[in-house]
Image: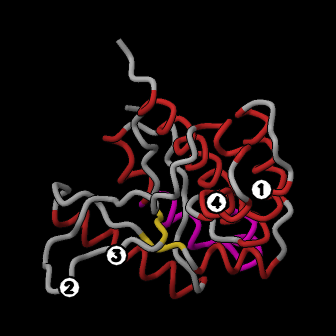
């Protein structure tokens, strides 16, 4: 299948099992309904299309807007519409989407010092800005992701709140695009496996 882009935030997936002392791997975004690629997305009932979109970004206005403009001629047209809707998120829409994100923890195989540093960095960020740190790691090699997240949090902790809202909104838009592309490709790959 198509590998899911590793993302550093998640929606509605518990970060740890109650009573567990191990740090879990970075979880995947909640799975939305399977709509059989772009054709299925275009033909789906509005509630089904919105549910898939909400599994990518938890802004109801964003999901409603993207779903309302169906049918899309291509996946790229859909992704462009998702981007455009992401740029137009109002403050309440952005707050809603960011509130649904949660900080992902490093892979359990990461060194203990790295896990501790990342947990502390996430806590400092959330304390400063009131929401989880979001960053898209689409295109970042697996071995570089932990360093990228730590560097991102540390550099963004120096931002003023309004400046950070702009950065977080852009990262959330990139996350939503990567998640949506993955959802559509995942279903197409499942129905049409390679040789």
Marks counted in the figure total 4
**Mark pair 4, 3: CA separation:** 23 Å
Q: Where does label 2 land, which residue?
A: 18
Task: Give SS at disc 4.
Answer: helix
**Mark before the other along the chain sequence, 2 or 4:** 2
Residue depth check, mark 4 versus mark 3: number of the one nearer the observer: 4
**Mark before the other along the chain sequence, 1 or 4:** 4
Q: Residue at x 49, y 47 (%)?
A: 137
Numbered label attached to residue 48: 4
How far from the left and from the top, in percent, is residue 1? 37, 32
**Mark pair 1, 4: CA separation:** 9 Å
Drawn side of residue 69 relative to residue 102, left or right: right
Drawn side of residue 77 relative to residue 24, left or right: right
Query: Which image quarter is the C terminus in?
Result: top left
Q: Which residues are magenta?
A: 150-167
Task: Give SS at disc 2.
Answer: loop
Which colour scheme appears in the figure? secondary structure
Q: Where does label 3 land, which residue?
A: 14
> Looking at the image, do the residues carrying marks 1 and 4 touch, with CB atoms under 8 Å apart?
no
């Amino acid at each position: 299948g198509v590998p899911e882009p590793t993302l550093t935030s998640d929606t509605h997936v518990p970060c740890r099992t109650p009573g567990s002392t191990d740090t879990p791997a970075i979880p995947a975004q909640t799975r939305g309904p399977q709509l059989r690629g772009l054709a299925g997305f275009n033909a789906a009932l509005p509630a089904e299309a919105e549910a898939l979109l909400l599994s990518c970004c938890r802004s109801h206005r964003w999901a409603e807007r993207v779903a309302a403009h169906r049918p899309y001629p291509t996946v790229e047209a859909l992704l462009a519409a998702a981007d455009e809707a992401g740029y137009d998120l109002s403050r309440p829409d952005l707050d809603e989407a960011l509130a649904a994100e949660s900080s992902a923890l490093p892979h359990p195989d990461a060194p203990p010092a790295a896990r501790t540093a990342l947990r502390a960095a996430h806590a400092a960020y959330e304390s400063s800005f009131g929401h989880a740190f979001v960053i898209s790691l689409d295109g970042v090699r697996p071995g570089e992701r932990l360093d990228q997240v730590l560097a991102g949090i540390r550099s963004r902790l120096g931002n003023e709140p309004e400046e950070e809202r702009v950065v977080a909104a852009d990262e959330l838009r990139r996350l939503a695009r990567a998640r949506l592309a993955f959802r559509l490709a995942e279903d197409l790959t499942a129905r049409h496996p390679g040789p």
